[in-house]
Every structure is written in C-alpha cells, then in structure tokens.
Amino acid sequence: MSADGMTPRPTRAIGVSLADLAQELGWSGEASAAQAVVGITGSSRSVRYGDLFFALPGARFHGADHAAQAVSAGAVAIVTDTVGASKIDNPGVPVLVSPHPRRDLGIAAATIYGTHESGLTIFGVTGTNGKTTVAYLLDALLRQVGLTTGLSSTSERVIAGCAQTSGLTTPEADEMHALLAAMREASVSHAVLEISAHAVTRERVAGVQCDVVGFTNFSQDHLDDYASMEDYFLAKSALFTPERASRGVVCVDDAWGRRLAASAGIPLVTVASDSIGDAVEADWRVTVFQSSTEATTFITSARNGESLEATVPLVGDFSATNAAIAIAMLVESGITLAHIRDALGSSALIDVFVPGRTEIVSGDTGPTFYVDYSHTPEAFARTLAALRTVTTGRLTMVFGADGDRDTTKRAEMGRIAAVGADVVVITDFHPRTEDPQKIRSALMSGAVSAGSNAAIHEIPDQREAVRFALEGAQRGDTILYAGPGHEDYQEIRGQKIPYDAREDVRQALRDAGWPPRKKTT
C-alpha cells in the first residue's frame, strides 16, 4: 500500500496518449498526440507528475477552482465540464471539456491503468445491510481455497494481506482503478468490492466490469440523498446490468430482492432463508440449525441437490444467509462447492473476522457486549431479534443516529429498539452540524411511542452511556452498542474527534471488573 496513506497506485505506468483518450471519449479542446498521461486523479491534493486532472463539479465547490494547484503539482492536462472550463484562465496545460466528466473519470482511469483487461475476477456486493459482512466472507472463503485476494470495503482496503483504512464505502473512480491495478501488480487474482448506491449514482464504479455481483437486502436508508425508496432501489439495481456485471446472486427474502431477481438484465441465481417459507422459490436455500452468542451453523442447499454445511463465527440467522450469498457467488464464478468444502476442512468453519459487525469485545466472563455498525431500522430489528434468541438474561441496546443524514428513519429506529430490547440507552453518535438534542429527541419519541416495557434512558455522552449500560450487568446479559462499528472518531460541527467505541467498551469492562476480549487483527 502507499506510504502516504492514500489509495495505492500501480508502480509501473503504461502511458496513454492524451489525444487518443480525447478522441475515444469525445472531449473537445486541443490535445497533443505526443503528450502521454501516466496517472489520473479527481483530487488536486493527489496529483502526481504526468497526471490527468479531472476538475469535477461538487456540492460546495468546483474542482476547477483548484486547477492551478493541480498544474503546479504536475498535472499535464485538465478535463472538466463547460462550467469548469469557464473558471480556468491560462492554466499552461490543455483544458478538455467532457459532457460526462464523472463517468469519463472512471473510463479514462480504466484505460490509463489497464484495468479494463486486468485479468482479475471481480466480485461486487450491494444492498442496504450486510454488504461489508458478505464482502469479508467472500474474501475469507477465497483465501481459504488458496487464492490471493484484494478487498475494498467500508472498513479497509486490503491488497494481498496489506491493509489501510478506508474513507468512502466505495472509493472514487480514479482511486478504484488505481487500486485494482495495484492489486494486479501484487499478483491478486480475485478482488472483492463493496459497492454502495452512491457509488453507482456518482459513477465511482464507471469502467468496472464485475464478474459476479451480489444483493443482500433492501430497506430504508439514505432518503436524504434519494427522493424516494424507488430511486434508492433503482440506484442499486443498476449494478445488475450487462454494462456493469456478467452474473448475479440475489437474496429474495424481501420483496425488493424478488423484484430485482425478476427484472435484472443479467443471468442470476437466488438465495432464500428457510424463514421466508416455501412460497418463495430460490436456487439456494439456507437452513440454520445451531446458534450461539459467537457462531451460527447452517446448511446451504442448491437446486441440483448439492449442499454445504458450514459455521460462521457471527451471530444471527442473517449471518448464515450472508454466508450463503458469498458461497453462491463463488460458485457462480466457477469455484465448485466441493472445492469450498475441502478448503473448510473438518471444522467446516469460515475463518472470517468482520471488524465492527456484531463484534464481541467482552471476555469469557460477565455480560456479552457487542459493538455493531447497524444504523437502519431493519438492521436494528434483525440484530435485536438475533441477540434475543441467544440471550438468557437482559438485553440492553445503546445507540444514537447520524446527524445530517436521513431524518425520517430516526423515530422508527427508536421504536424498534424499545420493542426489541429490555433497556434502551439513547446517546450521541455523529451529530455533525445538527443539534444533538434534536436527534436524541426524535429517537426518544420513537422509543416512547412503542409503548413497550423497556426502560428508556437518554444519556448524551457516549462514554457515560456505555458505563450506564454495564451497571448491574451480569453473565447471561447482552449489550448491543449499535452505530459506531469499526469507526474511530465522532464527528461534531465538522470536526472528527477521536473516539473508538470498541476501545471505550474494553476500558469500561475493565473498570467494571470484567476482562475484555483480546483484539482481533
């Protein structure tokens, strides 16, 4: 990975004629055939000598405002839209105008880095909840069958075992293609990409052709960015088209999945859990037959009669379904079920660790304490239901809600927490520019509206909330801290304040006399 913490690039530059790129993509302006482009970026802060700089329009500023900085750093040409071109005066390098600059950023990056014919087998995973878990399951299974992998997830980017922290769920298009090219240089054969709806809408996967894409589920989220659930769904379903993928795997446990399976423009297979019933037909069925606070054992069966029994070290029936989606995706890529079975060995264990996803941070004594990334009503409901089945004592939930994000889901988040938990502790999460009291009030209103027997508390400081949740807790009790997951900061008024929920919980457990679990790396 790169030493500066930025998304890595390949070390060997191919060099592409600027004139050839301009002609291929229909850019207007003067482009010299003699000018070679060896890199590409949409950020003036990431420009290296020989780069093509894409000055993109943004919500708060235009990339053209930073054209001089990009040229000073070594950009040999600029591509922008008509508005951007009007802002750039005597840059000293060619300025080319594209009618679709965001799309062209990805297509040009694929050409410059050679990722349009990289030889990688690429998996893409989308859905409202479970994307990260399926991505990690895919990566783990691929490694267990003996392959060298690359991973791009919400949590981190990994190339052949070397990792660095992620920024966005899906990197920008220039970074994505640079990452794929760096994977190829590191002899990676199979890459797993977590792909958000925003990544599709904002062309972050332009120029990427997935071999297999997977769909986990669909429920309310991001209605601050999408006008309706329909628009949000269409953004995700656009991944299941010939322009973006060759084959697909779709979970049909919800109506949206069934709609996608019926309308997708690529060949696909479907996955369903036994809980959905026989009325829903599927190519793969998932049956859970053993659950604990730490693992779920299941059988996934194909239409042709083949089946695989496996254990995933994650809680909840939905974890088994996520694993089945990953298994089906491997089979669609050409890896046989027999090969997977042999790789898992006699333990049948999928050797996966998913940071911040129902991650147990408590030790062998005392209450079981999970830190999770759940931040939607559906994720709350699924996780609480799963924990209820393995909890013999009291179930407590600590959570907050994102500021400057979908406000319409907050009351429902509070209601579901009060229905599913015995004790509800509402705290601050990422208020961002919003008044945190306003966010908590919406959550409290929803919790009270449930009319349940849950004890409901409002404790603004998350450290105090964690310690309150531990008061009187004992073996057999479960505490779920939902929201922060793997993140190591809290965003307040535009500032990222260091805060690692997992470390906070570990210290709180020590303070309460309960030894925490050792860190997993």
Image (cartoon, rainbow, N blue to C red):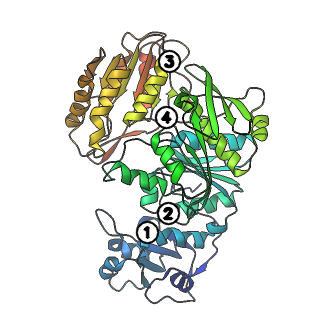
Tell me which numbered mark, 3 or 2, is placed earlier along the sequence. 2
Pointer 4 and pointer 1: residues touching (CB < 8 Å)? no
Name the residue: 38% across, 40% down. Answer: 489
Residue position marked by numbered label 3 in the rendering: 389
Question: Is residue 154 visible from the viewing direction of this image?
Answer: no
Per the image, label 1 sits on a secondary structure element best described as helix
Q: Are marks 1 and 3 in contact (CB under 8 Å)?
A: no
Mark 1 → mark 3, Cα distance in angstroms: 47 Å
Please identify, in this view, whether the residue under mark 3 or under mark 4 is nearer the observer: 3
**Pointer 1: what residue?**
102
Q: Label 2: which residue?
A: 173
Badge 4 amino acid: Gly
**Circle 2 Cα neighbour tier, 10 Å, few/some/many (<14 / 14–19 / ≥20):** many
Looking at the image, is mark 4 or mark 1 nearer the viewer?
Answer: 1
In this picture, residue 324 sits left or right of residue 505: right
Residue at x 45% of width, y 73% of height: 53
Q: Which residue is mark 4?
A: 356
Q: Position of residue 453 (x, y in %)?
A: 30, 14
Helix, strand or loop status at disc 3: helix
Q: Amino acid at mark 1?
A: Arg
Q: Residue furthest front?
A: 279
Q: Quadrant of the N terminus?
A: bottom right
Disc 4 from disc 1: Cα separation: 32 Å
**Residue at position x 42%, y 74% from top?**
100
Indicate which disc, 1 or 2, sits on the residue closer to the N terminus.
1
Q: Name the front one of labels 1 and 3.
A: 3
